[in-house]
Amino acid sequence: QLQLVESGGGLVQPGGFLRLSCAASRMTLSNYAIGWFRQAPGKEREAVSCISKSDDRIHYLDSVKGRFTISRDNAKNTIYLQMNSLEPEDTAVYYCAAPLKYWACSSAPGAYRYWGQGTQVTVSS
């Protein structure tokens, strides 16, 4: 079974940074668009960022623009989400996901077929 695994979450103070990683087994991530989502308690899952299969389209949630950066390392079969200037409002479980239409980004969680188990990010002083 195809599997995505997130790592890199943790507790950080406001203004701090984290780098999340999304690694895959039995799938080559360079063949997919990959999205990052987050879900805070009591809130719906929201799209944070996405990178298209060909890397020519990158999307960010407005509230993270200029602070978060998505990137690929094909040699490591890993997608990264660099998160800088973290704010308490960024606190959530973060998930990476691969879409049904493997080449295309979407902000809709229902458009994604494969999900990781999530990694907790907590921004607090």
Image (cartoon, rainbow, N blue to C red):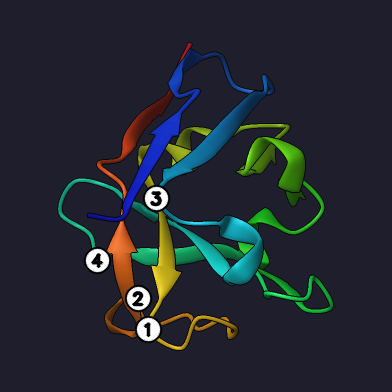
- Looking at the image, is mark 3 or mark 2 earlier in the sequence? 3
Closer to viewer: mark 3 or mark 2: 3
**Is 27 situated left or right of 62 in this image?**
left
Closer to viewer: mark 1 or mark 3: 3
Q: Mark 4: which secondary structure?
A: loop
Mark 3 → mark 4, Cα distance in angstroms: 29 Å
- At x 22%, y 54%, the residue is 1
Picture disc at residue 44? 4
> In the rendering, at what x and y percent does residue 88 appear?
48, 33
Q: Mark 2: which secondary structure?
A: strand
Q: Amino acid at mark 4?
A: Glu
Closer to viewer: mark 3 or mark 4: 3
Q: Residues within 10 Å of mark 1 (few under 14, many from 20)?
A: some
Height in image: 12 above or below 87? above
Q: Which residue is mark 1?
A: 100
> In the rendering, at what x and y percent does residue 46 appear?
39, 66
Is 30 or 99 nearer to us in this picture?
A: 30
Picture disc at residue 112? 2
Q: Amino acid at mark 1?
A: Leu
